[in-house]
Image (cartoon, rainbow, N blue to C red):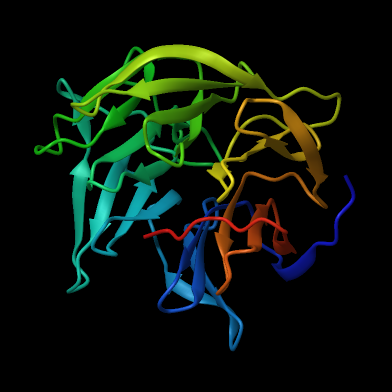
Amino acid sequence: MSVEFERLGTGFLFTEGPLWHPGGKFLLFSDMPGDHLRRWAAQDGVTTFRKPCNMSNGLAYDRQGRLLACEHATSQVTRTETDGRIVPIATHFQGKQLNSPNDIVCKSDGAIYFSDPPYGRARFFGLERPQELAFQGVFRVGADPKSPVVLVDDFDRPNGLCFSLDETRLFVNDTARKHIRVFDVTSTGGLAHGRIWAETKGDKAGAPDGMKIDAAGNVYCCGPGGIHVFDPNGSLLEVLETPEHTANFAWGDDDYRSLFVTASTSLYRVRRAVPGLPAF
């Protein structure tokens, strides 16, 4: 489907991790190869938020509005405290360094879930180095940064993730396998009964990456040719054809009807009829 994309900035190396701040009315987004966490606001355009940023990728806010960041260069998840200190909250599993936390979501009860593929151990997207873990999985942050809880360990390249509207299910996509799986969220915060929910099909370039849900329960996921939109039952509604290869997107603006799209060298915005959800 052809839609009108507004380009808000360009000239970046590879954009990722967009995140809208509802109070501040600004967007953060990562430029991993540039080791640059940038900020966009209507009044002053694109500026620097943090540089260096340990090649950050996925971003989220916790329930207190503190910034959570997946860092490719350090293979850890960090939280920025209200006084500006950056604190690691997930670094290792059973004595081995995490692969490279990629994307992250925070449940309404404060539980933090993240995907851990090895992309940040490759040249350009991170720092080239061998993988220590023998699997690629999905984790929940625990009380000890060195002991996150592994929830699923049989992914090839786990990537984007988002909760259903009622948070009883978690959607996680697999870039290499080009599908979206859904899991039931247990009463203790675990994941159970994983099954394939939808596939991103097409002959154009692109694969599952960033993923979000709108207020009607439709799931948006990167895929061949752009952004694939699925209804709550997993049926494909449309494909938003993006101007460049797209890695991620986030809802924003006052009415949450703007989709901010990080597409390789540029940042775009496209308006939608159905709004998304606030980050916190």
* Residue 110 appears left or right of 8: left
Q: Residue at x 23, y 63 (%)?
A: 64
- Number of labelled discs? 0
Q: Is residue 249 above or below residue 23?
A: above
Q: Quadrant of the C terminus?
A: bottom left
Q: Please state the horizontal and vertical placement of residue 63, each as a whole percent of the image.
A: 26, 57
Along the viewing direction, whichever of 33 and 240 lies nearer the viewer: 240
Q: Residue furthest bottom?
A: 43
Spot occupied by residue 32 in the image (x, y as percentages of width and height): 52, 51
- Position of residue 149 relative to residue 109, above or below, is above
Residue positioned most to the right:
2
Q: Residue at x 77, y 35 (%)?
A: 237
Res 222 → quadrant: top right
Q: Is residue 144 left or right of residue 184?
A: left
In this orientation, which residue lies closer to the viewer: 270 or 100? 270
From where the camera sits, is residue 72 visible?
no
Quadrant that contains the N terminus? top right
Residue 67 locus on image (x, y percent) = 32, 60
> Quadrant location of residue 102?
top left
